[in-house]
Every structure is written in C-alpha cells, then in structure tokens.
C-alpha cells in the first residue's frame, strides 16, 4: 500500500471512530458540548498522530484494530490543545484547518469546556481500548499523561506563553518545541508500540523517531509561517514575525533552519533503518520526507 493510501485509510478509520465515540447515545441537554467537540475533531487535518500510532503498531506486527483506540485518544488530546491554543487568552486565532476556530463558532466558554471534555475523553478512550489488555491500556494512559502533561505538551505551551515578545535562546526554544510539538509525536509512536507489545529496544527507537520528526516538523512549520499562505495552509500565517515570537527562523536564520530540519529528518530515518516490517518501514521513511518537503 502506498503512503498516500495508507494515510487516507487511517484518517478515515480514525474519523469514524472519533465521531462514534463523541456522539451521545440519546437526547442530552448538553448537546452543544458534543457539537463543539465534534466540530473540531471533524475539521480535517492530516491525522499525523493517529497515522504514527497505527504505523508503529504495524511496524512491530500489530493490527490496526489494536491501535485505533489509542490513535483516537491522542487525536482527542491534540485537538484539545488546538482549541485552547486558539483562544483569545492564548494565540487568539480565528482560523484553524481552513475553518473558523472553535470559540468563533461556539463562544469562548463552550470552547474551553469542549477542550476540557476532549482531554477527559482522550483518557477514557485510551483506558477502554477493547482490543488491548488492561495492562496495555494502563500503560497507554500513563504514557498519554506523561507526554501530554506538565513535562510534555502542556509544559511546552507554558514555555511558549512566557516566551511571547521576548528573544529566547536556542536552548529554550529547543526545550519548548521538544515538549509542545515533539512530545506528542513521540507519544504517538510509543502508543503504537504498546499496542503491538514491542520490546524496550524498539520502543526507544520509536521515541527517537517521533522526537526527531517532531523537531523537524516544527522547524518546517516555522518556515511555512513566513513563506506559506493562509489559503494553502488553512491557518493564519505571518503571525510569528508580527508578534515578535522567537522561532527557529528568527534564531538561526532561514537557511540554517532548513538545514537543521533536513539533518533531524535524516536522524529520524536512521533511528528505524533496520526495524520491523520492511513495507511499513518504507512508508515511515517516506513520511519523514513528506513532512519535511511539504511546502519548502
């Protein structure tokens, strides 16, 4: 199966499960909350994190069925972060994936609750994966909390907030990105390993792949913010420079940032160069290039 076809299949399967899990079983008084959650999870996107979860499960011999609930869980967590990131108190953005952001449609209060509810549903979904053992589900919940919490994504968001309108060092920037962006990609890969019962050596390779890919992905995103356009990307561009935000472009310069992204991409590839199923590995290597060269 080609990378494009595989990504499409994973996205379709993830979307179907997300809508199923986020639909009330009957008439409820809080239907606006469900509407707000489904609005953001159904807004599109590449489903990068679910793809990585299912692919790393497949890489080490597991079936998609085992990985899909974990994939839905991490996508809920990711979507929560987008809803909250767009709020007036944070990035104050009005466009996400080519559509008005959640608070623009449903109001700020409901958007906050939708993000909170998605966070809870992420853990419930992960804990209730019917195709994995209770032990696997417990480990998956722990991993989701670790990579999504104060030492992971949310910690990175805090560093991002306190770094607004000031110049930060490369070390701080790398810490920010490793937590805010790379952590969830590593988590996605690790969740796939848990679903497949992969050993510690393979899990460490998956973590490294996700980290290197996540760092490269953010650098590419920084470059797209100054080179891309809103219509193509489906989100506002040029905001980093206008807000005085430190990025890899502002800290390193555009050409050095591009070179670093390429180096990190090659390191991600190297981490799994001799791992698992050959066909799946080939797609994961191609995926690195897709993320790097998608617009520059």
Image: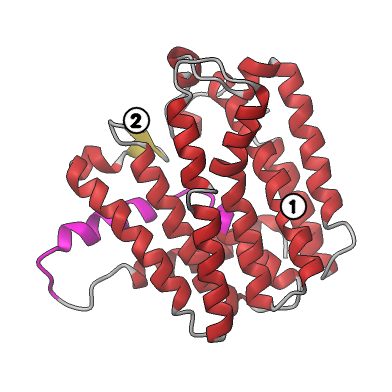
- The residues bearing labels 2 and 1 have C-alpha atoms spaced at a distance of 30 Å
On residue 209, the disc is: 1
Examine the image and state in which quarter residue 187 appears: bottom right
What is the x, y in percent for residue 23?
A: 27, 70
Residue closest to the eye, 115 or 239: 115
Which of the pair 122/176 is nearer the observer?
A: 176
Secondary structure, mark 1, is: helix
Coloring scheme used: secondary structure
Residue in the image at 38% along x and 55% along y: 41
Query: In the rendered image, which quarter contains the C terminus?
Result: top right
- Furthest-front residue in this view: 150
Give the magenta range. 27-49
Report the residue that reaches farthest toward the right.
274
Q: Report the residue marked by disc 2.
A: 93
Q: Nearer the viewer, residue 126 or 238?
A: 126
**Picture coordinates of residue 288, whole percent (x, y):** 73, 46
Work out whether residue 109 can be spotted: yes
Residue 189, quarter of the rendered image: bottom right
Residue depicted at x 55% and y 70%? 140
| Residue 267 placement, left or right of 149 | right
Image quadrant where residue 259 sits: top right
Quarter of the image containing the N terminus? bottom right
Say if the magenta span includes residue 38.
yes
Residue 178, numbered label: none
Give the vertical position of 251 relative to 110 (above or below): above
């Amino acid at each position: 199966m080609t990378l494009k076809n595989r990504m499409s299949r994973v996205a379709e399967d993830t979307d179907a499960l997300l809508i199923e899990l986020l639909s009330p079983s009957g008439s409820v008084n809080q239907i606006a909350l469900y509407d707000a959650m489904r609005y953001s999870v159904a807004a599109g996107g590449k489903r990068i994190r679910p793809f990585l979860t299912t692919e790393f499960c497949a890489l080490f011999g597991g079936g998609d069925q085992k990985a899909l609930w974990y994939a839905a869980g991490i996508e809920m967590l990711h979507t929560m972060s987008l809803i909250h990131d767009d709020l007036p108190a944070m990035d104050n953005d009005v466009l996400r994936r080519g559509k008005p952001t959640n608070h623009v449609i449903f109001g700020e209060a409901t958007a906050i609750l939708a993000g909170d509810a998605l966070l809870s549903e992420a853990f419930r979904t992960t804990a209730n994966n019917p195709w994995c053992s209770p032990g696997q589900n417990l480990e998956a919940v722990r991993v989701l909390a670790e990579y999504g919490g104060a030492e992971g994504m949310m910690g990175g968001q805090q560093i991002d907030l306190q770094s607004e309108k000031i110049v930060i060092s490369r070390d701080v920037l790398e810490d920010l990105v490793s937590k805010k962006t790379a952590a969830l990609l590593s988590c996605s890969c690790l969740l796939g390993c848990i679903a497949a019962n992969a050993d510690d050596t393979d899990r460490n390779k998956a973590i490294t792949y996700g980290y290197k890919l996540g760092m490269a992905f953010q650098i590419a995103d920084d470059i797209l913010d100054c080179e891309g356009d809103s219509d193509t990307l489906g989100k506002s561009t040029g905001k980093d420079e206008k807000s005085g935000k430190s990025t890899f472009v502002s800290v390193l310069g555009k050409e050095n940032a591009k070179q670093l992204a390429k180096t990190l991409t090659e390191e991600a590839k190297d981490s799994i160069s001799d791992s698992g199923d050959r066909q799946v590995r080939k797609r994961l290597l191609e995926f690195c290039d897709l993320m790097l060269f998608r617009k520059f």
